[in-house]
Amino acid sequence: MAEPVHLVVDRTACAGHGLCYATAPDLLEADDFGNPVVGAGPIPESQREFAQRAATACPERALTFTSALPPSEEKTS
């Protein structure tokens, strides 16, 4: 089984171009302001190529494709 990966959005860098959710519509959708919203949980293996393409397509580099768990999802004990 592959290590879980996530897409993380840097909301301060995002300019709402929409290339990411146009590239990976099964993984991302637009909020009311046109910014991307990533679904909960890790990216399924079958969608990883699309997630990488979405991160690469962003002209602002506001998406990160990473194996690290986003801080908002870290579990605390």
Image (spheres, helix red, strand yellow):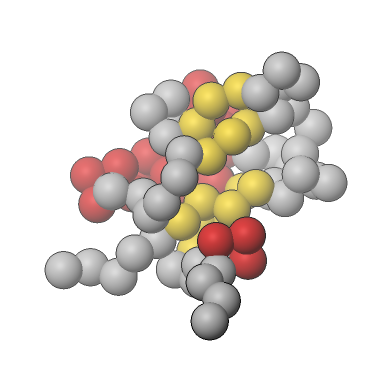
Tell me if residue 76 can be seen.
yes
The image shows residue 56, relative to residue 77, as above or below, that is above
Residue at 46% across / 56% down in the picture? 6
Q: Residue 65: x and y, percent?
A: 50, 57
Report the residue at 72% width, 50% height from top.
10
Instruction: Please name whichever residue, 76 or 61, is drawn nearer the observer in this view of the structure.
Output: 76
Tell me the residue at 76%/44% (across/down).
Answer: 11
56 vs 27: above or below: below
Vertical order, 36 against 56 (above or below): above
Badge count: 0
In the image, residue 38 above or below residue 21: below
Q: Which residue lies at the image location 23% right of the left edge and 68% below the top edge?
A: 2
**Residue 36 spot, x, y in % from top left:** 62, 32
Residue extending farthest to the left is 1
Q: Which residue is at the far right?
A: 12
Considering every residue shown, the one lying at the far bottom of the view is 77
Quadrant the N terminus occupies: bottom left
Residue farthest to the front, as pictured: 77
- Give how far across and how far down residue 41 sits, in percent: 41, 51
Q: Nearer the viewer, residue 76 or 71?
A: 76
Could you tell me if residue 17 is visible in this image? no
Left/right placement of residue 52 relative to residue 14 reads left
